[in-house]
Image (tube, grey):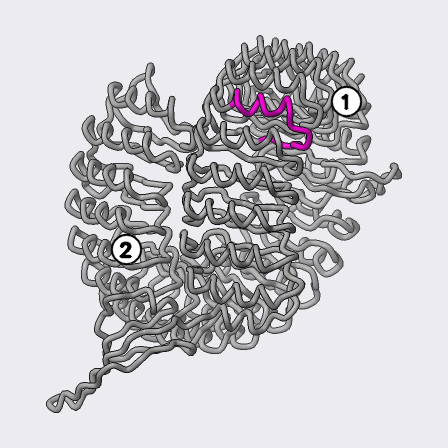
Amino acid sequence: MSFSSGLDICSYSQFPDEDEVLLPAGTKFLIQKIECEDIQDKYNIHIKLLAKNNILQQQLDKTDCVTTMQLANSELDYLDMEILLKYVKDNLNLTTIHLSHNRIYEQAAEALVDILKSNKIITTLQLTSNQLYDKGAEVLGNALKVNTTLKNLNLRDNGISVNGTDALRDALKENQTLTNLNLACNRISNEGAEVIANALKVNHTLTTLNLGLNQISDKGAEALADALKFNLTLITLDLHRNLITEKGAQALADGLKANKTLHTLNLRYNKISDPGAEILAEALKVNQTLNTIYLKSNTISDKGAHALSDMLKVNQTLTSLYLEDNQIYDKGAQALADTLKFNQTLITLDLHRNQISDKGAEAFGDALIVNQTLNILHLYMNQISDRAVEALSYKLKVHQACTTVTFRDNEIFAKETEAFADAFRHDPTITSVHLADDAMMDFGIEALGQELGVRRAPTLPNSTSDRIIDTRGNVLADKLQVHEIVTTLNLQHNQISDEGVQAVADTLKVNQTLTTLYLQNNQISNKGAKTLALALKVNQTLTTLDLEHNQISNRGAEALADALQVNQTLTILNLGCNSISGKGAQVLADALKVNTFLTSLDLGHNEISDKGAQSIADTLKVNQILTTLILSKNEISDKGAKALAMALKVNRNLTTLDLQNNQISYKVTEAFSDALKVNQTLTTLNLATNQISTKGAEIIGKALKVNQTLIALDLSSNNILDKGVEALSNTLKVNQTLTTLGVWYNGISEKGAEALAEALKVNQTLTTLDLNCNKISDKGAEVLADALKVNKTLTTLNLIANQISDKGAEALADALMINETLTALNLDKNQITEKGIGALSDAVKFRQPVTTLCLLQNQISAKEAEVLANTLEVHETLTTLSLEHNQIYDRELKQSRPF
């Protein structure tokens, strides 16, 4: 037949020949000609496609009275917009539509205009990361002139420039309802900022405006500042990641002196430095409305901190000051700490990632004894020792207002843990304790466990606040009522043995609020696992238990399995990297036939073998709740893998299956292929580092031409070679769901790269392609570069260790000049020198949306490093630049730079 299958059939103009094609229900076409081949007894049917198969229509038919429609990442195009328009006209309840990350172009924007004109109750429209450009903004602007209900409009990352802002300006002058407008990550520049500022002088409804990541410098800031002098409604102004210096800060400061409404000003990642901080500080001595200012990553040092501390002695409205990732040392910290003794309004002070040492921390400790209003103080990622942490912990005993203190990246030992436990007893407002990677011994655990178990709920006035102590690991900020207490306990990477875990288990028996417990990378054996299992039979709140990287074998697994038959709250259990064999897997599998709560089980890096895999497969046929199953590196061969594949034909809930690093050959891929043709729930399948080979890749490729649910497939390190990747490439031409494909270390050359490139020119869904550790060379890089000039969906391309030199780098750089979607490019461990670096540097200057560029272990010298440094001066969106292991010495860039 001469047509293609898939969801978006109408978008193809040339169709690959297929002997068998599955046309999804709803596909409309006109038969133009039928030819009969007498020799082969075969008919060729020539058709003209009239309309696509539409899953959207099927979904809309099932919804009668929804108020929020969530259609982000749904592959929608202009035909879908027409269908949506018909639905919206008839729906009298719909108030919110999420359409972010789709393929909505200018043509589809016309349908959106009709939606806004016809529907009289929609209040929120989310359009982040589409491709509306200026024409789309223009038609939306015209719609806003007549729309009387829309309050929130998100146009982030849509390629809108000054021409688009002209239409939005006119709309803002007439519209009487829009309150929130997000234009971040576009191409507005100074000229566009001036246009928007002009509208703000007359607009009387907008309260929130986001212009971050728009290449706005001082001139644009001056225009917006002038608007602040007249505007009477704007509450939040976001200008993060622009190019504003002290000159722009001066203008904004003048605006703040006159403005009577602005509450929040975001100036993160600009170039304000000390003079700008001093100017803003003077303005805040006068301003009486601003309560939050973000000054992260602005090269502010002690001098700027002194100016801000002087301001805090006078200002009585500022409640949140964010100064993280600057250059503040102890002197600046001491100045701010001294101010806290007098200031009665500041609630949040963020100073993480500065240069503060023990002296500065001690100053804050003294200040907290006096201060009764500061609620959150972030000091992590500084240079504070365990001694200073201990001292400050004792001072927390008498400070009942500060409920969040962070010291992440310091070393807390038994004595200090006891101090924290003691402080914890005196402070009844802390809700989350993170002591990961702190070399904590059993003694410290016992001290903390006693407090967790016996502490009564505090009797304080009803109010909400953020309460956390975090000493390494992610900082969690839970908004909890004051009668609630600890919900998360992170004790990973310590030296906790079975004796220490007893205290934790005792806590679980009486504690009624803990939901998450991290105990990975400790020294817990079967005895400790049994202790925890007994606690799980009693505990009614814990939902996540992580025991990865301990010393638990079958007996410990048996105890936990027994607990799972009784426990009714645990949803996530991680037993990866222990010593569980097939016997242990079998008892866990039996437990899951009874348990109806566990949704995620990680048994990766154990020894369950085929016996364990078969037991788990049997369970999958009856279990109706498990969604994630990790069985990586478990000595599973074809027998066990086939059992799991057969289970997928029956199972209706598993979404993620990880079988990487086992002993699975191409012979079992036929079983997986059959499963993928009928399974409608699996979205992620990891078969990396097995023995799939070319033949296996071909078999799986055929299945994915039919499968419409899998979004991530990893066949890395399987020796699939060029022929295998060619088969997968043919699949990508028709598959409409796969977003991530991993094929690293597969012996792929330029020939395979060429096949992938052809697929990328047609494919409209793939966002991540991993080709690391192959041998595509410059020729392969060139053909991929040509594809990037056409492709509109790929965001991440990994090409580590692929023998790419300057020629390939230059080709990729040229592609970046045209491509508008790629944000991450990894070229580590190649052979790129001065010429290639120059080309990539120029491309990155031009292409602001690029956020990640990895070039470690190439042949970059100090000269090329200087070129990249100059690029960073004008590029404000790059968050990761990796240059380790090049030929750069102490005076130049030497390692990854996070921004």
What's drawn in magenta, residue-wise?
A: 221-237
State the image quarter where residue 884 is shown: top left
Tag 1: amino acid? Thr
Task: Point out residue 162 in the picture as x, y percentages from the top left corner.
Answer: 43, 34
Residue carrying label 1: 345
Q: Is residue 506 left or right of residue 727?
A: right
Residue type at mark 2: give it. Answer: Leu
Look at 61% across and 68% down and name the residue there.
90
Q: Position of residue 227 (x, y in %)?
A: 59, 25
Magenta stretch contains residue 369 = no
Please name whichever residue, 584 or 328, is drawn nearer the observer in this view of the structure: 328
- The local secondary structure at tag 1 comes to loop
Q: CA distance from mark 2 to mark 1?
A: 56 Å
Question: As drawn, is 882 to the left or to the right of 615?
Answer: left
Pick the front one: 523 or 122:
122
For residue 565, side relative to residue 159 (left or right): right
Local SS, label 2: helix
User: Which of the image's four quarters has the C terminus?
Assistant: top left
- Quadrant occupied by the N terminus: bottom left
Residue 760 marker:
2
Question: Relative to residue 556, is residue 52 depicted above or below?
Answer: below
Residue 898 is at least partly visible in this image: no
Above or below residue 507? Residue 686 is below
